[in-house]
Image (spheres, helix red, strand yellow):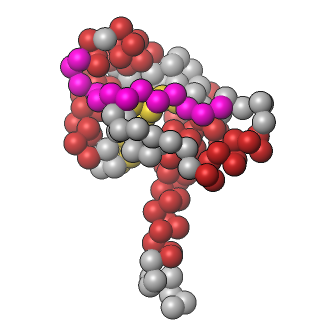
Amino acid sequence: DGDGGGGGGGKKRSHAKRHAEFASWLLQIFGTEALRGGAGVLDVAGGGGDLAFELQCRNGVRTTLLEPREVRLDSRQRRWLRKQGEGGLGPYRHIRDLLDERFEESDEGARLLREAACVVGLHADEATEQIVDAALKYGRPFAVVP
């Protein structure tokens, strides 16, 4: 309808852009080199993995997605990776788990939390408090958008 507010198309585009915008903000605030340090970024409750894709595949920041549900790259992401060839980091790592006490006590979970360059959550809903608590406990930088 011309004003950008109707028909849902504009809303869907802006919804899709939020991952790229948050990734850009993280890079600006924390710095690309800092985010590339340690174990990279830990994206908690990252849903479909769009933020992890933006950080790792498009910006070269190693990212681990901690999300209990199965996640698959969509056709747009697979096509983008094919065009990049072998030069990039490839798809992000996905751990199907929750950020909870059991994960923290596991060898892998404790290592990721100790070594993460940053712990992040974009609309992580119930996991927001766990992200903040874990980041403070392990002395890691963090960013959440509730």
Closer-to-camera residue (77/27): 77
Residue 140 image position (x, y, % from top left): 38, 23
Q: Which residues are magenta?
A: 90-102
| Residue under the image location 47 percent in, 30 percent down | 94
Asked if 93 appears above or below 124 in the picture, the reply is above
| Residue under the image location 61 percent in, 52 percent down | 75
Residue 60 in the figure: left or right of residue 92: right
Residue 114 image position (x, y, % from top left): 39, 14
Residue 121 image position (x, y, % from top left): 37, 40
Asked if 44 appears above or below 38 in the picture, the reply is below
Q: Is residue 98 magenta?
A: yes
Residue 105 in the figure: left or right of residue 9: left
Residue 92 shows up from this direction: yes
Residue 114 shows up from this direction: no
Q: Is residue 89 magenta?
A: no
| Residue under the image location 21 percent in, 19 percent down | 101
